[in-house]
Image (spheres, rainbow, N blue to C red):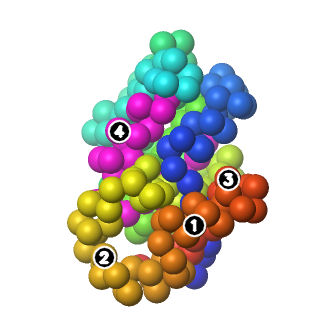
Amino acid sequence: MIEFSATIAFGLIRRLATAGTDTPSLYLLISDAGAIPAIQADIAAEVQVQIGVGVRALAPVDVRFDDSQGAFAPDPDKPVTLITLDHWLPKLVTALDRNIVLLTRSGAVLLLASRKVAERILAEAPNLRNRLTDVVEILPDEAFGGPIAWRRARPSASRTGSRQANGGGSGRDANRIARSTGTGVATRPLTPV
């Protein structure tokens, strides 16, 4: 079982703002597939509030490498690029792996992937893996003490089952631990698929 630190959009974007959006950085964000739309909205809102710019959100169909220079040209109005990979696309991952220099030249790049896709990226894209700034499990903001609607909607959301699968405790427990340790980051295991 691989463990990655867990965070929410607020903490992630705070890290980006501290480093600067013009600093090349590449984050692999691991999420449950059902939470991806909520996380996309959280990231867009936090980038707007904390940095004051927009997010260039790209779906896999939007990423084309026939014009590699143009695909990842820096955009001063949208210096944060969010690429969502909710299912395995081997040609896209190979293209990202081969064009890693162009990808990182555009500033901050966030790859949001489901657990299965993230595991395959880490195993099959060595250039991309070596350029990663960090790999984190990202949770919707509501998972750290907000409404429990998202937790109820998860397929494995039985009260005892989800706690055991996630290393015990709730999102509130993880948040309390992160605050008490002063790290602002809770560690949660990534369950194998």
Where is 31 relative to 193, above or below?
A: above
Which three-letter amino acid code belongs to the residue tagged 4?
Answer: Ala
* Cβ atoms at labels 2 and 3 below 8 Å apart: no
**Cα–Cα span, label 2 and label 4:** 22 Å
**Cα–Cα span, label 3 and label 4:** 21 Å
| Numbered range of the magenta stretch | 26-47
x 33%, y 47%: residue: 38
- Say which label, 1 or 3, has the lower sequence index: 1
Where is 31 relative to 42, above or below?
A: below
- Mark 3: give few (<14), some (14-19) or many (20+) Cα within 10 Å: some
* Cβ atoms at labels 2 and 4 below 8 Å apart: no
- Mark 1: give few (<14), some (14-19) or many (20+) Cα within 10 Å: many
- Say which label, 3 or 4, has the lower sequence index: 4
Which three-letter amino acid code belongs to the residue tagged 3?
Answer: Gly
Q: Secondary structure at mark 3?
A: loop
Residue located beneath label 1 in the image: 174
Give percent across and percent down for residue 25. 65, 37
Instruction: State which quadrant residue 106 falls in.
Output: top right
**Mark seen at residue 52:** none
- Say which label, 1 or 4, has the lower sequence index: 4
Residue located beneath label 4 in the image: 41
